[in-house]
Image (cartoon, rainbow, N blue to C red):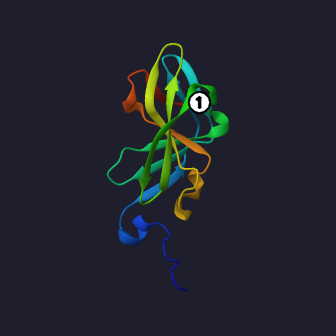
Amino acid sequence: MPETPAKSPGHREHPEHRVVESRVAGRMTVELGGTCLADSRDVVRLEEDGHPARFYFPRDDVQMQFLKPSSTTTTCPFKGRASYFSLRTEGAKADDAVWSYEEPYAEHVGLTGRLAFDESTSEALLIRSLP
């Protein structure tokens, strides 16, 4: 049976580039300055060559009132177009700290409706694994 060709430009041009999604066992949380932003048992870990592992939380498990849409967008040749959000709580803020692939390429449809947080945007932003 012939192999189905990859749909994303990145996977077509660089088939050796690894982008792997897996479910996280257990619970994970995200906090900014002591305020809980996300709490979930349904997190997807994404490992991509050349990048740190990222954790994607379902939108339903994120306190969206702390996220403000940003005008920033980026395009990944493997995953698609990302839209960004800035975080604001009473005690802290982090610009462009969260992103989402609302319409990812077919290989990464599992990221649809999920949000990733970038800890490097603020020392007050913490992503934790819990039992």
Which residue is most to the left? 50
Horizontal arrangement in the rendering, residue 56 relative to residue 120 (left or right) = right
Residue at the far right: name it.
60
Please tell me which residue is depicted at 59% across the width and 37% down the height of the picture. 26
Give above or below for 5 relative to 49. Answer: below
Q: Nearer the viewer, residue 104 or 53?
A: 104
The image position of residue 74, as x and y in percent, is: 43, 49
- Residue 76 in which image quadrant: bottom left
Quadrant where the C terminus is found in the figure: top right
Residue 49 picture location, percent across and down? 35, 54
Examine the image and state in which quarter residue 24 appears.
top right
Q: Residue 119, position in %: x, y?
A: 41, 31
Q: Residue at 53% of width from left, 61% of height from top? A: 105
98 shown above or below 45: above
Work out whether residue 89 or residue 35 is closer to the camera in this orientation and state it: 89
Q: Is residue 74 above or below residue 4?
A: above
**Residue located beneath label 1 in the image:** 38
Residue 63 shows in the view = no
Residue 23 placement, left or right of 126: right
Count of number-bearing discs? 1
Nearer the observer, 100 or 20: 100
Q: Residue 121 vs residue 115: left or right?
A: left
Tell me what residue is drawn at x 43 percent, y 29 percent. Answer: 95
Q: Residue at x 43, y 35 (%)?
A: 118
Q: Is 23 located above or below residue 20 in the figure?
A: above
Callout 1 secondary element:
strand
Residue furthest to the bottom in view is 1
**x then y, percent, for residue 7:** 50, 70
Question: Residue at the front extreme?
Answer: 71
* Residue 30 visible in this rendered orientation of the protein: yes
